[in-house]
């Protein structure tokens, strides 16, 4: 018995591919003919096929759609539904317009479930690729109210805003990262190629080198001889840190410590609060009740300390107490959000004011990060420049000391 890979065509002209266990190629042909399939190509699977199957299994393992793919799917589906297409037709067109193979497979999977009678929310939830809870909740509310196109359009706007904010922050961090990598590479080149050329000269001189030169040469020897060990130790330390952060209690303690830092409160806390406010505003505007929306919005917060603090207000919200008062009592959310919540409750426009507050908090967070980057970049440049100058200066001091002895 062996495993045979085949490609065949059915009566409708559709191409079928797969594998069969058989004793020979002729046996495979007979099996395919019994299934009303016409063989096109048959070959025995070998080791190469096994590796290909492993690659396919790894490539197709379930993973979350990235922000661009989810945004594209949502925006296209909303536009097509608002243009008057049925849900099935809109999903079929969305599959054709997909940004990637994964998005196309995702749309096809949803379409199959919808054709079997599932609602869009059920089809999305049953898929292999996980989606945010708020996403499913708003679609479910849109289907229940008969306003699915509007719900999808609202989702697309929120996802687009979040994606744009993230891209701006990432763009602001590109230059510092490139700078650090470039300077780090320069230091490695100096230690690996420049210092060894002077080592032999110092050894031949046999003179007592100045302390700065001795330190630099010793560091160079350690990096050249034990660099892999240092990299391994760094990897182990990073893995240990990651494991420590995986513990909810340790992560909570770290996040609580970070909340005491002024920079953290003015940047990442505002971004987290914006994410919370935007999700809550979107859900309540889409017909989800305030307590249910509050619970779902909590799950979108990345700071466990901020999330844990907000969870204590959930009981008050469930009891129908004033949302602004509950958030103010926590003392962790930005004052801007608290004021906008009060205005929203007083005017009856809470969903709109929450989204507006999220936009303003995102903008403040972005500006704070850009200001920080504008300060950090010159400091890093000066620090690394001093470090490189110190390395070169230490070598020059050693050379001058040898020349003095020779003179």
Image (cartoon, rainbow, N blue to C red):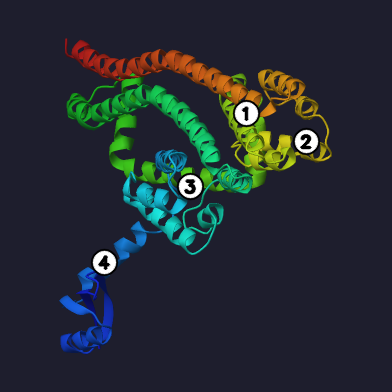
Residue named by callout 3: 239
Nearest to the observer: residue 336 or residue 305: 336
- Where is residue 56, by image quadrant? bottom left
Query: What distance separates the C-alpha of mark 2 from that of mark 1?
Result: 15 Å
Coordinates of residue 256 in the picture (x, y in percent) = 67, 32
Badge nearest the viewer, 3 or 4: 4
Number of marks in the rendered image: 4
Can you identify the residue that label 1 sits on?
273
Disc 3 on helix, strand or loop? helix
- Please name the residue that numbered disc 4 is placed on: 51
First reached walking from the N terminus: tag 2 or tag 1: 1
Q: What is the quadrant of residue 27 in the picture?
A: bottom left
Question: Does residue 368 sit above or below 18 in this rendering?
Answer: above
Mark closer to the observer (3, 1): 1
* Disc 3 + disc 4, Cβ < 8 Å: no
* Residue 66 higher or lower than 177, as above or below: below
Mark 2: few/some/many CA within 10 Å (<14, 14-19, 20+): some
Disc nearer the start of the sequence (3/1): 3
Tell which circle, 4 or 1, labels the residue nearer the N-terminal end. Answer: 4
Q: Which residue is mark 2?
A: 313
Task: Report the Cα–Cα distance between label 4 and label 1.
Answer: 46 Å
């Amino acid at each position: 018995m062996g495993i045979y890979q085949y490609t065949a065509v059915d009566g409708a002209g559709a191409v079928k591919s797969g594998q069969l266990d058989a004793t020979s190629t002729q046996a495979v042909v007979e099996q395919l003919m019994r299934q009303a399939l016409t063989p096109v190509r048959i070959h025995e699977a070998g080791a190469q096929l096994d590796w290909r199957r492993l690659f396919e299994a790894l490539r197709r393992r379930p993973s979350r759609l990235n922000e661009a793919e989810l945004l594209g799917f949502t925006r296209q589906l909303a536009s097509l539904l608002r243009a008057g297409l049925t849900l099935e037709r809109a999903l079929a067109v969305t599959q054709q317009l997909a940004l990637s193979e994964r998005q196309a497979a995702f749309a096809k999977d949803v379409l199959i479930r919808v054709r079997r009678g599932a609602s869009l929310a059920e089809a999305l939830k049953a898929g292999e690729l996980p989606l945010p809870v708020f996403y499913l909740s708003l679609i479910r509310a849109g289907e229940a109210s008969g306003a699915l196109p509007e719900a999808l359009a609202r989702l697309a706007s929120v996802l687009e805003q979040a994606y744009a904010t993230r891209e701006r922050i990432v763009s602001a961090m590109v230059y510092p990262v490139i700078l650090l990598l470039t300077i780090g590479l320069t230091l490695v080149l100096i230690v690996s190629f420049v210092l060894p050329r002077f080592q032999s000269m110092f050894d031949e001189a046999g003179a007592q080198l100045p302390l700065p030169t001795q330190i630099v040469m010793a560091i160079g020897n350690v990096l050249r001889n034990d660099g892999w060990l240092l990299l391994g130790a760094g990897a182990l330390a990073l893995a240990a840190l990651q494991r420590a952060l995986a513990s909810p209690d340790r992560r909570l303690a770290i996040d609580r410590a970070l909340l005491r830092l002024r920079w953290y409160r003015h940047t990442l806390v505002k971004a987290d609060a914006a994410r919370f406010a935007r999700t809550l505003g979107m859900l309540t505007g889409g017909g989800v009740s305030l307590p249910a929306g509050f619970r779902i919005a909590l799950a979108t917060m990345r700071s466990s300390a901020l999330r844990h603090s907000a969870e204590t207000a959930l009981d008050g919200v469930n009891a129908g107490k004033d949302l602004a008062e509950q958030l103010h009592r926590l003392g962790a959310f930005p004052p801007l959000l608290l004021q906008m919540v009060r205005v929203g409750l007083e005017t009856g426009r809470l969903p709109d004011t929450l989204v507006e507050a999220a936009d303003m908090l995102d903008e403040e967070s972005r500006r704070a990060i850009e200001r920080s980057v504008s300060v950090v970049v010159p400091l890093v440049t000066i620090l690394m420049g001093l470090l490189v100058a110190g390395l070169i200066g230490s070598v020059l001091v050693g050379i001058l000391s040898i020349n003095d002895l020779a003179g």
